[in-house]
Amino acid sequence: MASMAAASRGGAGGEVRVGLFVTCLVDLFRPSVGFAAVKLLQDAGCIVDVPTQTCCGQPAYNSGDRATTATIAVQVIEAFASYRYVVAPSGSCAGMIKRHYPELFADDPNMLRKAEELAGRTHELVSFLTDVMGVKRVDAAFDGPVTYHDGCSGLRELGVRDQPRRLLGTVRGLDLVESRNTDVCCGFGGTFAVKYGELSNSIVERKAATVVESGAGTLVAGDLGCLMNIAGKLSRMGSTMEVRHVAEILADMTEAAPIGAPHHLKD
Amino acid sequence: MTIHPTSPQFKDNAHRALEDRDLQKALGHVRQAFIAKRAAAAEALPEFEALRDSARDIKQHTLENLDLYIEAWEDKVTAAGGHVHYARDAAEAREAVLDICRRVGARTVTKGKSMISEEIGLNQAIEAAGLVPVETDLGEYIVQLRGEVPSHIIAPAVHLTRDQVEADFRRHHTHLDASRDISSHYSLQAEARGILRERFLAADVGVTGANFLVAETGTSVIVTNEGNGDLTQLLPRVHVVLASIEKLVPTLEDVGQLLRVLARSATGQEMSVYTTLSTGPKRPDDPDGPDEYHVVLIDNGRSSMLGTSFEEMLRCIRCGACMNHCPVYHSVGGHAYGWIYPGPMGAVLTPALIGVETAGHLPNASTFCGRCESVCPVRIPLPKLMRHWREREFERHLQPAAVRGGLGVWGWFASRPKLYRLATGLAMRALSIAGGNRGRFASLPLAKGWTDYRDMPAPQGATFQSQWKNRRAQPKRAA
């Protein structure tokens, strides 16, 4: 039911065609987040398509491999050329396309133009719903206290902070409790988490302690990377806190087991 | 002569730091107090963000015209009766200071807090020449007693607990009554003050750093909170200022703007307790001041950063906000970085000064969380510059073979969407089955860096893309 009024905005003849950039982690590890994103976009009046895709290229980019990054970026630019908007259920991947693709092609005027054009159409999922589609509330229910972690890229590269909290505030039965230091990194950092495992661990230990201290039963965030890191730490600590992507709650699609929790028996 | 870098052993350093209970206790202060104070100071000044823009522009403009400003500044220093010594590297800088000390027959050299003096290894050189260097900033004094280097650019002893400092004082101040009570911060300060007061009076040469060098007037500016800088530079006959070339700013008005962001970013103060401007030696009608005023202007690798992608790093005004807000610094403190400059600013500057072959870990040991950039008063894009170092390493094949190989395989697949979809589809199904009902892995051979410390959530099963394709093949579901 979310904001049908918004459905007429943003596209020719009232059609808002969105290409879902599903992100490699959601594609591979947690497809249920992708389907939650599809539902949220459709509820907001979008027509959703998923072109064949791999990754935004961030692992190569942050490892200093510009050539591989550029190859992947060209792929993304071409695959998503025809959509009115490109939406990703991740601040990190959306930030890569929005902020870093133009930097990547700074010396190539032709590609730069295309990269900037794509950057202008690309959004993180929740902020797209609120800021572009004008979604004010969602039709969802969730029982219990939930705390929200701000993924670094979404927060600092894209300014995503209030939008998810606003929508979570409209979920029936959901009690949003703030943790301390929600703007502090969880220690994931992509390949950093493996290359500097011990250091990454000390950062996520502090993060896990603050989310547990909040008293919430469920942790949500907008980035699967952060969530897998924190969930992995929580389960290793023996915590019973559940971890989910914010889209699952907003879409009222919480049938899948929480991240890192035992799978339900076959449905 | 300068400190031998242990940056190549960053991982070992970090491991030791994480196991060091005193250090972990001391770092609690950095994780909380600095951040809250900076935030409150920024909040209280409506034009703070505009001042950051202005600070960035002032420093950037100066760097782009650095030759002109250095010449103008030198003329003014000379006109005020001061002397300028140019030092291309650390050795020339040390020699310039020692020359002055020898000429005036110095025995004791007091020092205000100066990171560039750490960079050039001045204390060791002064000692080797048979003179006595005395650090007069409390934190620097403590660090000197311990034979360490500062672990933070504005809070040199932030890695230590009060108990450790008490033990150091008892070990070194053996001429004092062993039964004295120095269990409080105040009593420790009072003891250091008493000892340092005698040294101030005995000093022949006082060495300070500079926060700014002003081209318009030939003035050097230092900001301190303890007043030790003033006593260091006013009481001895000779004042020597050590400064690197990027300390230049055009005018006093510019200094005023930069001061408005400096202390707020550093400690959350509106102003440091003391802001001291020095222009030449004592004039005939001055009541006090040094007979000689020297500035040793040090390059030591910085001019080679000008005009490169690392030029922006030279805007740094050494406030320390980046390390105060850095999750990596919060975990391991400053010494783990293995040289002089820690935290994000060190991760960018150190490879430029001692080589990325030696300091390569530093720009890699970052999550790119971006909090450093978000608080930098001169808006240095620190994560971007760290990434530039990673690019240099990649170009020169300096990364570990396993990392490069792994990324190469991944990149090959990621550049071939159809093959990628097929391969990942199979792999995720296999992983999902291997994960079984537990929903996570406690150990994965290729990701030990992850699973040694935390579980790896298992994939749900079929990939999103394969499921999506199957759904599309079926009749369209109701929207």
Image: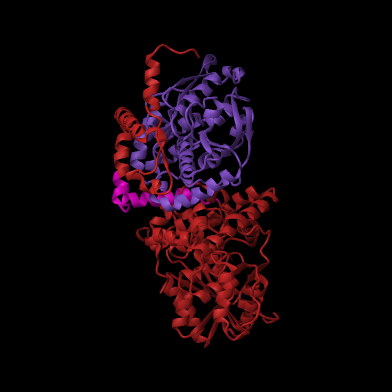
**Residue B61 placement (x, y as % from top left):** 54, 54
**Occupied quadrant, residue B268:** bottom right
Pick the residue in front: A241 or B250. A241
> What span is colored magenta in the figure?
B379-405
Q: Quadrant of residue B287?
A: bottom right
Decide if residue B403 is on the left or right side of residue B200. Answer: left
Residue B388 colored magenta?
yes
Q: Is residue B40 magenta?
A: no
Image colour for chain B is red
* Residue occupying the far bottom of the picture: B105
Answer above or below: position of A12 versus A221: above
The answer to whether A222 is drawn above or below residue B394 in the figure is above
Q: Residue placed at 42% from the left, 59% from the top?
A: B15
Residue B196 location, quadrant: bottom right
The main secondary structure of the magenta stretch is: helix
Residue B367 is left or right of residue B419, and the answer is right
The reply to whether residue B293 is visible in this rendering is no
Query: Chain A hue?
Result: purple
Where in the figure is residue A220, as x and y percent of width and height?
54, 36
The foreground one among B198 and B117 is B198
Q: Residue at coordinates 59% horizontally, 86% vertically from top-left?
A: B175
Q: Quick one: quadrant of the N terminus of chain B?
A: bottom left
Query: Is A80 situated left or right of A182 in this image?
Result: left
- Locate residue A137, reporting x and y percent: 62, 25
Asked if A172 appears above or below B249 in the picture, the reply is above
Q: Residue at x 45, y 59 (%)?
A: B349
**Which of the pair A244/B59 is nearer the observer?**
A244
Total numbered labels: 0
User: Which coloring applies here?
Assistant: by chain
The image position of residue A266, as x and y in percent, is 41, 24
